[in-house]
Image (cartoon, rainbow, N blue to C red):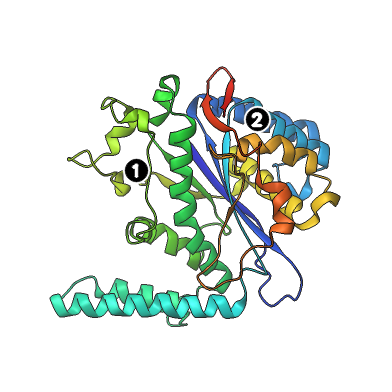
Amino acid sequence: MKIAVDESGNYGLGSGRFESYVLCALVVPDSRLDAVERFVADACLRWGRSELKSSAMKPPWVSDVAAFLAAHQIAAVAYVTDSEMMTRPIVADFRLRQAAAIARGRARVLAANPDYAGIAAIDELLERVAGSATHERMSDDDFIQAEQVPELILETVRRACLRYSEPEWDAEFEQFRFVFDAKQTGRLKAGERYVDEHLERMIGSTKRLKLDLPFVWANRPEHPFRCFDDPSGQHTLLGKLLKDRTWVRSEEDACVQLADVVAGTVRSAIERGALSPRLRAYDSLRIVLTDNDGYCLHFYKFRGAPEPDLGRYRPLLRAWPHDERLTRVSAGGAVLLEP
């Protein structure tokens, strides 16, 4: 299973206008990778592009991408926030609270072991979160994204497990590969490095984050995903599950390019509403974006932030009526909804 992550938009901190930000993870079963590579290569040739970049695509091209993803049982998870939920004072307050929590943890570590060898790494983490200039400073934008990524990744693994729970998809779970869009060539930005170095810790130390596996797997100890179990078989080893992750430039990876197109389409639908030229494409993406309960979007905000404006988001939230639920996605293309 390959998971590709890219984003679209700006947080709009202090811009004075409404802006949205969409962080998207595309879930591509290994059996679909060849089709993805062919589609992206053919599309670039047909449309005269060096890569598929959402901001440079015409609405009919975006609709073609959406139709392809839906037809090939490829899933996506979209985490959204905006300049009304994510304000500069909210971010500053959250960073201070995060730094205070790390400082308390540092004190507990030193109390237990004054010679703890990892204290320098904790100090660097504390300085990055607090926004210190001692090391490469992590901007507010990078910090917000870094805080979103662990929740996005865990939800994406959960989505993959639930959506592809049928036995015919078993082989897809022998390995997970995570590919992130890198903003620079040759080195990671401060926020990217923060995620790369601390992803497992950020997930494992957040109590509200948990990985729910399909109930039908409980009696299937031979399922390939169980290779990520701890010796007791009761917990998933994050280090083993998440170890295969890389950062690439988007032009180097077809899946990252498609994640960018999905993110840009969601953003257009949010910011332009009924006037968006991509509404047709968004409608095609609903079955790609939906969880099993029919919700297409996840809102992300810090504690104390305003609630999202549901008047803006309500037309985009659902993939089907509330009284139906996704129960089966077959490799042959059948999608089964049941009340």
Q: Is residue 279 left or right of residue 198?
A: right
**Badge 2 is on which residue?**
70
Instruction: Give the alpha-carbon distance from disc 1 to disc 2, as whole Å.
Output: 26 Å
**Badge 1 is on which residue?**
241
Q: Residue at x 66, y 47 (%)?
A: 317
Q: Residue at x 78, y 48 (%)?
A: 56
Query: Could you tell me the amino acid type at mark 1?
Result: Leu
* Of marks 1 and 2, the one in the foreground: 2
Q: Is residue 215 left or right of residue 140?
A: left
Neighbor class of circle 2 (other Cα within 10 Å; few <14, some 14-19, many 20+) is some
Q: Nearer the viewer, residue 126 or 311?
A: 311
The quadrant in which residue 333 appears is: top right
Above or below, 252 relative to 20? above
User: Which quadrant of the figure contains the N terminus?
Assistant: top left
Q: Residue 120, how many percent across, how many down?
A: 28, 75
Q: Residue at x 49, y 63 (%)?
A: 146
Q: Residue 267, how many percent across, how many down?
A: 71, 53
Q: Residue at x 23, y 70 (%)?
A: 118
